[in-house]
Image (cartoon, rainbow, N blue to C red):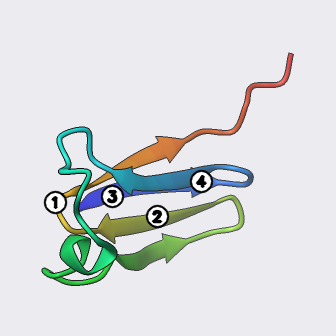
Amino acid sequence: MLITIRRDAESILIRPGEDIDTSMTLADLFQDGPIEITIFTTDNIRVKMGVDAPEELSIWRNDAPVAA
Protein backbone atom coordinates (compact mmCIF):
# COMPACT_ATOMS: atom_id res chain seq x y z
CA MET A 1 0.00 0.00 0.00
CA LEU A 2 1.24 3.45 -0.89
CA ILE A 3 0.38 6.06 1.73
CA THR A 4 0.69 9.63 0.51
CA ILE A 5 -0.50 13.15 1.19
CA ARG A 6 -1.97 15.04 -1.75
CA ARG A 7 -2.61 18.77 -1.96
CA ASP A 8 -4.68 20.82 -4.39
CA ALA A 9 -3.81 19.97 -8.04
CA GLU A 10 -1.67 16.95 -7.06
CA SER A 11 -2.71 13.46 -8.11
CA ILE A 12 -1.69 9.83 -8.28
CA LEU A 13 -1.01 7.76 -11.38
CA ILE A 14 -1.89 4.07 -11.59
CA ARG A 15 -0.50 2.21 -14.57
CA PRO A 16 0.83 -1.21 -15.52
CA GLY A 17 4.19 -2.05 -13.91
CA GLU A 18 7.35 -2.15 -15.99
CA ASP A 19 7.69 -5.95 -15.80
CA ILE A 20 4.09 -6.68 -16.76
CA ASP A 21 3.27 -9.29 -19.39
CA THR A 22 1.75 -7.22 -22.22
CA SER A 23 -0.64 -10.06 -23.10
CA MET A 24 -2.45 -9.70 -19.74
CA THR A 25 -6.11 -8.69 -19.91
CA LEU A 26 -7.91 -6.43 -17.43
CA ALA A 27 -9.40 -9.56 -15.88
CA ASP A 28 -5.86 -10.91 -15.39
CA LEU A 29 -4.68 -7.63 -13.84
CA PHE A 30 -7.51 -7.58 -11.32
CA GLN A 31 -7.75 -11.31 -10.53
CA ASP A 32 -6.34 -10.66 -7.01
CA GLY A 33 -8.76 -7.82 -6.32
CA PRO A 34 -9.58 -4.22 -7.18
CA ILE A 35 -7.73 -0.97 -6.54
CA GLU A 36 -8.71 0.33 -3.11
CA ILE A 37 -8.24 3.96 -2.04
CA THR A 38 -8.62 4.72 1.67
CA ILE A 39 -8.83 8.27 3.03
CA PHE A 40 -7.14 8.48 6.44
CA THR A 41 -7.30 12.17 7.35
CA THR A 42 -8.18 15.47 5.76
CA ASP A 43 -7.78 19.13 6.55
CA ASN A 44 -8.31 22.34 4.61
CA ILE A 45 -5.07 21.91 2.66
CA ARG A 46 -4.39 18.22 2.13
CA VAL A 47 -5.74 14.66 2.12
CA LYS A 48 -3.84 11.65 3.47
CA MET A 49 -4.73 8.52 1.55
CA GLY A 50 -3.62 4.98 1.04
CA VAL A 51 -3.74 3.22 -2.31
CA ASP A 52 -3.72 -0.56 -2.46
CA ALA A 53 -3.57 -2.19 -5.89
CA PRO A 54 -2.61 -5.51 -7.45
CA GLU A 55 1.19 -5.97 -7.60
CA GLU A 56 1.13 -5.87 -11.41
CA LEU A 57 0.19 -2.18 -11.22
CA SER A 58 2.51 0.69 -10.42
CA ILE A 59 1.37 3.66 -8.30
CA TRP A 60 3.15 7.02 -8.57
CA ARG A 61 2.65 10.43 -7.02
CA ASN A 62 2.13 13.13 -9.63
CA ASP A 63 3.00 16.44 -7.99
CA ALA A 64 1.63 19.80 -9.07
CA PRO A 65 3.98 21.77 -11.29
CA VAL A 66 6.02 24.40 -9.48
CA ALA A 67 5.08 27.96 -10.46
CA ALA A 68 7.95 29.85 -12.06
The image quarter in which residue 62 lies: top right
Q: Are marks 3 and 2 in contact (CB under 8 Å)?
A: yes
What amino acid is at disc 4? Answer: Ser
**Residue 42, located in which quarter of the rendered image?**
bottom right
Q: Are marks 3 and 4 in contact (CB under 8 Å)?
A: no
Residue 48, which numbered label?
A: 2
| Numbered disc 2: secondary structure | strand
| Residues at marks 2 and 1 touching, judged by CB atoms closer than 8 Å | no
Three-letter code, disc 2 = Lys
Q: Tell me the distance, in whole angstroms, between the alpha carbons under discs 2 and 4.
A: 12 Å
Alpha carbon distance from label 1 to label 3: 15 Å
Q: Name the residue located 51 percent from the left edge and 54 percent from the top edge.
A: 12
Q: Residue at x 40, y 53 (%)?
A: 15
* Distance in Å between CA atoms under marks 2 and 1: 21 Å
First reached walking from the N terminus: tag 2 or tag 1: 2
Which residue, as the protein is rendered here, is positioned at the far top?
68
Q: Which one is nearer the viewer's eye here, 61 or 3?
A: 61
Q: Which residue corresponds to mark 4?
A: 11
Mark number displayed over residue 1: none
Left or right: 20 as drawn, with respect to 47: left
Residue 4: percent from left, percent from top? 41, 54
Looking at marks 1 and 4 on the same chain, the residue that comes earlier in the sequence is marked by 4
Which residue: 40% across, 76% down?
A: 37
